[in-house]
Image: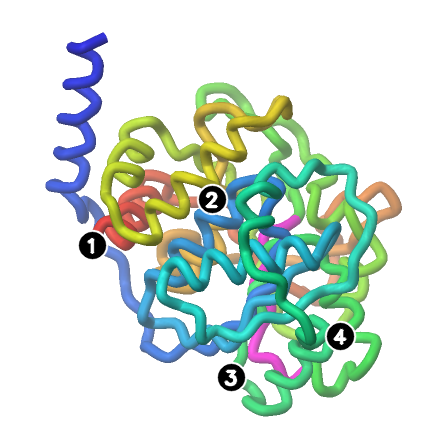
Amino acid sequence: MRIRARALSLAAALLAAVLPLHSVAQPADGQKIVVSTDIGDDIDDAFALGLLLSSPEFEVLGIASTWGDTALRARLLQRLLANTGHAGIPLAMGVPTRSEIPFSQSRWAGQGKAVDGLPEAADFILAQARRHPGQVTLLALGPLTDVARAIERDPQAFRQLRQVVLMGGSLRAGYGKSDYRPPNPPAPEYNILSDIAAARKLFASGVPIVMLPLDATQVGLEEPQRVALFAHGSAMTDALAQLYYQWRDTDQPWASATPTVFDVVPVAWLLAPSLCPLQPVRIEVDDQGYTRETPGQPNARACLKLDKPALVDFYMRRLLR
């Protein structure tokens, strides 16, 4: 065990020392972002916000909780922002819904302050789109219920968004952990399946959509990377370590040692589009929640192949600097 511990420590040190291993093109600063997230169930939302908040290229206009217990998610966000020096970022709260997924990080969230009087997520999205026409990216990291409510309330204002970048869907590959066998067939992906009607509204909205589906987002954060992150000692990596271990301390089968950081990929794409090239597609959402490629005028651009090593290198470089 002592030899293994030394080996892991050495791996973490080497990882930090050799980054960056890949170079990626950098976008201009000042990207205006509004986030919709179901943080608190799976752990990938927390890792995604870690990258987002560690990237000075972004001007984060606000973060909205969505799906399930949105009030408790807002408390988690409040604590995360306060603990990491981002308390000035506004919060919004989505409409509560019934969710079958356990809130794995509820104990950590419960220690955040109650946040009363928050604007509703749909109204907040529309207000930012009106205030900054053609400039705001809506980053959708959860089910699309509040996105659809915004479309329903004011489709014209919603179309003033620059784009919607979402983690969602499955085009040519479904869920699966192995890179060493053929991919599983497409599957109904959770964020789409949770609210099929909402997903249909988004794909019919006329707003530019960038889609990061299961084909490109199944990236594992392996033990050497986790050791380097959790030993780093910054406020952000300390918060991620606590959330990770609370997520692990559940009975859910997906809470394995190596997390799949789906939601990191759309954040990384905004920073380094070369990591995940896009192609135009026309998407229709069927009654079972499949995102089907169909003939016709494209209504989205999708990444189907990610440079996974470069993504992990990029993520680690940002969090460890």
Looking at the rendered structure, the kind of residue marked 3 is: Gln
Helix, strand or loop status at disc 1: loop
Looking at the rendered structure, the kind of residue marked 2 is: Lys
Residue in view at x 75 percent, y 73 percent: 205
The residue that mark 3 highlights is 135
Helix, strand or loop status at disc 4: helix
Q: Earlier in the sequence, mark 1 or mark 4?
A: 4
Q: Distance between the residues labelled 1 and 2?
A: 27 Å
- Measured as percent of width and height from the top left, residue 300 is found at 63, 63
Q: Which of marks 2 and 3 is in front?
A: 3
Numbered range of the magenta stretch: 159-168
Q: How far apart are marks 1 and 4 (CA)?
A: 37 Å
The residue that mark 4 highlights is 150
Specify whether 241 is left or right of 143: left
Helix, strand or loop status at disc 3: loop
Q: How far apart are marks 4 and 3 (CA)?
A: 17 Å
Whether residue 94 is visible: yes
Tell whether label 3 touches label 4 (CB within 8 Å).
no
As drawn, the label of residue 305 is: 2
Tell whether label 2 touches label 4 (CB within 8 Å).
no
- Assess whether residue 162 is covered by the magenta stretch: yes
- Measured as percent of width and height from the top left, residue 264 is found at 46, 50
The residue that mark 1 highlights is 321
Looking at the rendered structure, the kind of residue marked 4 is: Ala
98, 115: nearer the viewer? 115
In this view, 296 is above or below 229: below
Q: How far apart are marks 1 and 3 (CA)?
A: 28 Å
283, 232: nearer the viewer? 232
Q: Nearer the viewer, mark 1 or mark 4?
A: 1
Looking at the rendered structure, the kind of residue marked 1 is: Arg
What is the quadrant of the N terminus in the image? top left
Tell whether label 3 touches label 1 (CB within 8 Å).
no
